[in-house]
Amino acid sequence: MYIGIDVGGTSIKAGVVNHAGDIITKYAVPTPLDNNENFLKAMLESVQVALKEANVKADEIEAIGIGAPGVVDREKGLLVNSPNIPYINAPVREYLQKNLKNVPVLVENDANSAALGEYYKADNAKNFVFITLGTGVGGGVVIDGKLFTGTNGAAGELGHVVIHAGGRKCGCGREGCWEAYASVTGLIKTTKEHKDEIKGIKEGDRISGRTVFELAKKGDKDAERVRNMWIEEVAIGITDMVNIFQPDELVVGGAISKEGDVIMEPIREYVKKHSFNVGELKRTNIVASRIGGDAGIIGAALLYKNKSEG
Ligand SMILES: [Zn+2]
């Protein structure tokens, strides 16, 4: 049995997870936004309640994994910093080992953890790419069954490949990153840029990532056109990922992936048409997330399993 902890800006979610990657129980607490001490206490509480509800004792746990936004120190077991949570060098390994049991505690970036969760739920994949469309575009890569983290652990920033040179300014400092177009933030920006052409949008309407999807479903052709512009931006980057990795499977996550085939079908068509021609050889299976918001917990829980597998 493992524990997986998914650290987010609003909640810390802990789950008791078995070897197959199924969540036995999970428990969430609000993320304290004041200091390291309260953050660590809240994390411990989430674990203790999840264990109690699963009726599992701390000494039955083989390992704990933590997925967190921002920078982590895998060697020392620290959460170094995060764009939206004010901890600095939070010593999560030391703290959990002191208060629970001396088990291995692994820390990983949240998108990489979610990638691993989806990987273990994929059909027979050894080479695997995950992208998540949210405020930004996150991702993770599994090569030959192992999470790929690069020379310094920072690999997998798939959203920061440039797809429009000299284009929109990105949070990372470059211009024209995939993230600036294919994220939900990018979708909202594109919708605002074209709002005068969309009859269904009235002056003063609040524009969200759902706006063009909802209007298109009601038959608004202009909203459909803007929606399709965004889907194409997503598909351009996915085509690049397919050309680089030729993975067995590529999973698209983030809440917007629940739109399902409205998004996935045109992406598959675009990739089929524009990716490098491999003739009759096997092609990447491109699918929407299977486990949604649980990917972070499951992937964090299975970090140890992934590390120890041959
Ligand atoms: Zn960028």
Image (cartoon, rainbow, N blue to C red):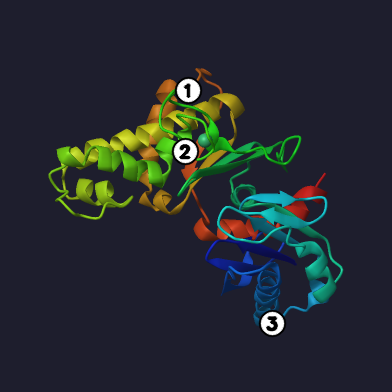
Distance from disc 3 to disc 2, alpha carbons, whole Å, reads 40 Å
Question: Do labels 3 and 2 touch, CB within 8 Å?
Answer: no
Residue 64 lies, in percent from the top left, at 75, 63
* Residue 169 in sight: yes
In percent of the image, x 76 and y 50: which residue is there?
A: 73
According to the image, label 1 marks what residue? 275
Numbered label attached to residue 231: none
In percent of the image, x 60 and y 68: which residue is there?
A: 13
Question: For this view, does 230 lie left or right of residue 149?
Answer: left
Q: Amino acid at mark 2?
A: Glu
Residue 273 sits above or below residue 203 on the image: above
Ligand 1 within 8 A of label 3's CB? no
Ligand 1 within 8 A of label 2's CB? yes
According to the image, label 3 marks what residue? 52
Q: Depth-wise, is mark 3 or mark 2 nearer the camera?
A: 2
Q: Secondary structure at mark 3?
A: helix
In percent of the image, x 43 and y 29: which residue is there?
A: 236
Q: Earlier in the sequence, mark 2 or mark 1?
A: 2
Count residues near mark 2 (Cα–Cα under 10 Å), then give few for <14, some for 14-19, many for 20+: many
Q: Depth-wise, is mark 2 or mark 1 nearer the camera?
A: 2
Count residues near mark 1 (Cα–Cα under 10 Å), then give few for <14, some for 14-19, many for 20+: some
According to the image, label 2 marks what residue? 179
Distance from disc 3 to disc 1, alpha carbons, whole Å, reads 49 Å
Which quarter shows the C terminus? top right
Which quarter shows the N terminus? bottom right
Count residues near mark 3 (Cα–Cα under 10 Å), then give few for <14, some for 14-19, many for 20+: few
Q: Secondary structure at mark 2?
A: helix
Q: Earlier in the sequence, mark 3 or mark 1?
A: 3
Q: How many marks?
A: 3
Q: Quadrant of residue 92?
A: bottom right
Residue 133 lies, in percent from the top left, at 46, 46
